[in-house]
Image (tube, grey):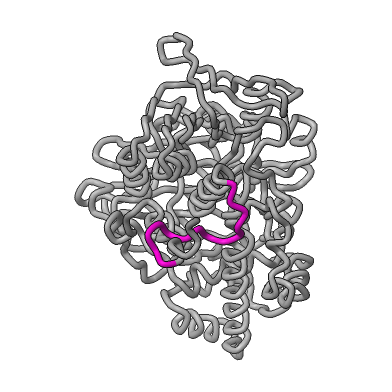
Amino acid sequence: MSRVVVIGAGVAGLATAGLLARDRHEVVILEKNDRVGGRAGTIERDGFRFDSGPSWYLMPEVFDHFFEMMGTTTDAQLDLIPLDPGYRVFRDPDAVGGGSGPVTVPAGRDQVTGLFEALEPGSTATLDAYLDSAQHAGAMAQKYFLYNPFTRMRSLLAPEVLRALPRLSALLGTRLQSFAARRFTHPVVRQILGYPAVFLGTDPRSAPAMYHLMSALDLDQGVSYPQGGFWRVIERIEALARDAGVRIETGAEVTGIRTQDGGDGTYVTGVGWVDASGSTHTESADVVVSAADLHHTETALLPPSLQTYPESWWARRTSGPGGILVMLGVRGTLPELPHHSLFFTDDWDANFDAIFGATPTVPEPASIYVCRPSATDPDVAPAGSENLFVLIPVPADVDLGHGGPDGAGSPEIERAADAAIDQIAAWAGIPDLRERIVVRETTGPADFRDDYHSWRGGMLGPAHILSQSAMFRAQNASRRVQGLFYAGATTAPGVGVPMCLISAEIVLKRVRGDHSPGPLPVPGSSAAMTEAP
């Protein structure tokens, strides 16, 4: 049993703390903000409740496994609603081919196959092969790569991996956009298959084709919604951590990681922190887990001599996009929009050049994502009103500024929000949308920096290009300080709520000295009994 301090109460911090407490460690979380959840936050105003972060519930098996590791089940913790349709794609009605109207993506492979066949006759066999490949890649990733601490490289020498090596190498050496373009010609089909790269924080022209596995998640498995929103997911993970004995201190800003030199190197002794009143404190620990932004942890909480990932390392990294978030309370109903919508620009390359190119700027028009949770959940908006969450991917640039309530944010942020509102109104056929807005909140890259210490104000973390994926991504343990570990989207295995849950399990493995590549056996299962010493 060790005394553990976890820095940050986002998804990864809460999950790591819960797993370690279940392993009989004494755990305290120090969170700088006045609430838990990190980027998976919530905003309440005038009867509207907005998720201010993740909104796609994908990779359900990862949630299932985490809840089982915590001694419960997903069914006991969440009320999941399958979404049908999964989402709708809107394009500029004035663009070439845009006048054919929106494309609604149904739930289930059979229905998706019918949609693709209607858009691109003769594509059924090609789509089946594409999704079969995506399923195989996803299964291999979970079994050998995502949960792997990469402390024993022989874990990658399993016969199944070696047999698949030629195919895996081809997927790693090909880019997602070209991989889809070789198989399909319809522009909307290509965009549907390429857009998941954005949720991985990268450009589909740069993402390895290995990430076509994402298409198996929404097109094959389907999309669900946790009733109550993602904030309900946070509430349940927090409750499970507290039930396991975790103590959570909010308003607790960690100012430094304390270390001591010993005969066998440098090891952690705790952290220094300051409370909301400005009083300083020291929390002793045998183990420190930083679930805060890795750049902040390494460059602000450690001296240069103890940094595994110093500023010079970050100078060679590629950031994922920044994000402008627009949360709208709207009077009246919006049947034109399903629960999830994607608004894709006709000039796909220009959109990504604006975000990731040499001279980054806010795209005009932008490819945006819109969530209408009130389509499924009556508790997120007053009766007779709608709740909209709009995500505008932009460059990771804090100079774009802050958001604010009711148009009070920085000029660049509010201009982008206005443009997105007008775009939704025009493309979805809601001409009076602007006049019906009764609540408006925006968030900009400077808010991500100030609220979460996000590197460059990025929304997600380092992009999932090949050199920043799997064993090439920043790993979950310091190479300079014994007992210092890392969890969250800025470290392995990557961005997104499922990846944060997996990073928590990788830290658990590191603390245990477990080198296995796949998910841990669930306590009490026959597999766990077999592997128990």
Look at the picture and state if 358 lies above or below 143. Answer: above
Foreground residue among 110 and 332: 110
Please provide the residue range marked out in magenta: 513-526
Q: Position of residue 506 (x, y in %)?
A: 56, 49
Magenta segment: does it hold 180?
A: no
Residue at the spot x=29%, y=50% of the render? Answer: 228
Q: Residue at x 39, y 25 (%)?
A: 250
**For residue 237, what is the image quadrant?**
top left
Q: Horizontal and vertical percent for residue 22?
A: 39, 44
User: Is residue 411 in view from this perspective?
Assistant: no
Left or right side of 62 for 214: right
The percent coordinates of residue 28 (x first, y second) are 42, 29
Q: Main secondary structure of the magenta part?
A: loop
Residue 367 seen anywhere in this rendered image of the structure:
yes
Viewer-proximal residue among 477 and 22: 22
In the image shown, does 84 or 514 lie closer to the viewer? Answer: 514
The answer to which quarter of the image holds residue 358 is top right
Q: Is residue 523 magenta?
A: yes
Query: Which residue is painted at 31% across and 59% down in the image?
Result: 375
User: From the viewer's perspective, is residue 132 above or below residue 440?
Assistant: below
The mark total stands at 0
Residue 413, horizontal then vertical, whole percent: 54, 35
Q: Residue lying furthest front in this view? A: 533
